[in-house]
Image: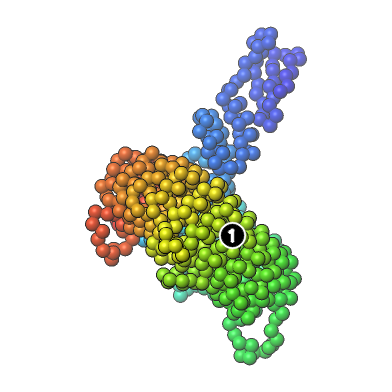
Amino acid sequence: MSEDNSGGGKVRNSVSGAGTVTGTVAGAGEYFTAYPDQVLENVIENVLVFLTSRHDRSTVSLVCKSWYRAEAHTRSDLFIGNCYAIAPKRVTDRFKRIRSIALKGKPRFADFSLLPVDWGAYFTPWAHAMANAYRALEKIYLKRMLVTDDDLAVIAHSFVNFKEIVLVCCEGFGTTGLALVASHCRNLRVLELIEDDVSVSVDEVDWISCFPTEGTTNLESLCFDCVEAEVNFDALERLVARSPLLKKLKLNTPVSIRELYKLIVRAPQLTHLGTGSFNPFVEINQQQGDHQEPDYAAAFAACKSIVCLSGFREIAPEYFPTIVPLCGNLTSLNLSFANVNAEQFKPVIRHCHKLQVFWALDSICDEGLQAVADTCKDLRELRIFPVDAQEYDEGPVSEVGLLAISLGCRKLQSILYFCQQMTNAAVIAMSKNCPDLVVFRLCIIGRYRPDRVTGEPMDEGFGAIVKNCTKLTRLAVSGMLTDRAFSYIGQYGKLVRTLSVAFNGDGDNGLKSVLEGCTNLQKLEIRDCPFGDSGLQSGLHRFYDMRFVWMSSCRVTRQGCLEVARRLPKLRVEVFRRDEEEGERGDFVETLYMYRSLDGPRPDAPQFVEIL
């Protein structure tokens, strides 16, 4: 602060970075400061620009009205975990300077066909609201939203400096919308389509050719591996050649390994690569012209910057060893589409000593997981998916593979593991060998599967996980579980924010233990469990603090749901059936979905959804 008293009756109070305030001297040692609230808000705003955590910002906004206004005025990034938790107009009225927005729609169980296709999560009202309020918007991230080509047209025509769009598990749009984004968003840096259901029509648009054709582009990331339609490869090759900043490229299945070769030769700067099919599609002796097979290994060896590798959607296993020159630098390897066996897999994984993230199909078997454990000592995340999710007595991966991983990969922080059989001993060993686990999702395929060796429930295994893994925030349980397991979760799972439960439990006492004990619980997903009204209503004190509760094929009644809606009027309580062909369940509702909302019932609910 500086004061200047010379020669006049003015006093200037200056706060560094906060602007200046002018007052008038009233007497010796006295002065008057105009608009003290505005001064405070200016100071706060200059502090808040350094506060990036959305949780911290939300806390700051609750202090007082002045802080609330200052936080809204300085926020540029917005995250909305449920598109129905707040109306678009309320958002745009409060926040005026948003540059980046992340918006989520349908609950996760939609991925398992447990939600009707036309349930909702429409992006259209959000697109129009943002177009009117946020002309300077640069980034959009959408997950499980229904996005139309018209919505993409709004994005393409409304935001003059638009740079990034990421669509995850979205549906409703096609190549027409992608073409509009490519042609009109001239500053586009990121276009990522991740596990989307992109519409296929007879009039497919050559959207790749719609990117600027002259000069260099700003593209840094281009991911379209989920797009089924073929792309114009010549246009794609020219686009890659004109994109010197391109670091991430993920190709779709129609791109062959021969075309992949041409692209990586033109883009040795890539750090993330999705390989497309990894199949030549045409036998060498059937090709016309040049019969020489490209040297794929040499091309990969020249890509010294690649650290993340994925794709392999229709892999020809004989080409798999060509990635070995890349393996020494890889920190992430995604083989979740590569149906390779242990013998094909082991010679490759032996070179991946720096690997931190690994996804694969269970076709690599316990033997392949043993090779991972022997090699990847720095592994932090593991996901094993089933080739065949049918219920069998035995499967290709089991407690043997899980035990091997726990012994060899002691830095593990996150695991998703699909299997047909498991033992308490293996799960207990993982809890002791990998105490830094933050995410533990064990999915034993089949209903009420006990310990394979002892025939006992899996209570002690999951109990050990919540006891010994003190950083755990996400848990998925399966197999035969009794109320004891849920008692352990409620007692020790104090940091658990997301809990998924399927095909287990004794009754309401288990659900009560969770709702009363897991004080940080935000998302609760339950299907096919014997939990009823008593268990549900034991969480009345928690539901306003949670993002959502999902219960399908349980034992809750419409009357029990009505009681929750009556006692918690700001909670949206939806009940519906996912399939009109399903048989009647008596008094029990088929699906219950509850979420907190600042606004009234959503206006776009279809007829099969009843909002209580």
In terms of depth relative to the viewer, which is nearer, 450 or 454? 454
Q: Is residue 128 visible?
A: no
Residue 548, image x and y in percent?
42, 48
Q: Residue at x 48, y 63 (%)?
A: 422
In terms of depth relative to the viewer, which is nearer, 86 or 368? 368
Q: Residue at x 48, y 51 (%)?
A: 463
Residue 43, image x and y in percent?
63, 30
In terms of depth relative to the viewer, which is nearer, 145 or 163? 145
In terms of depth relative to the viewer, which is nearer, 271 or 349? 349
Question: What amino acid type should be assigned to the residue bearing mark 1?
Answer: Ser
Q: Residues within 10 Å of mark 1 (few under 14, many from 20)?
A: many
Residue 66, image x and y in percent?
53, 29
From what the image shows, is residue 50 above or below residue 578?
above
Q: In this image, 273 relative to 460: left or right?
A: right
Q: In this image, 524 relative to 232: left or right?
A: left
Residue 102, image x and y in percent?
53, 51
Q: In this image, 296 relative to 111: left or right?
A: right
Q: Is residue 498 visible?
A: yes
Query: Which residue ends up furthest to the right in the rendered image?
Result: 6
User: Quarter-wise, where is residue 17 in the image?
Assistant: top right
Residue on which the image places disc 1: 406
From what the image shows, is residue 314 above or below residue 567?
below
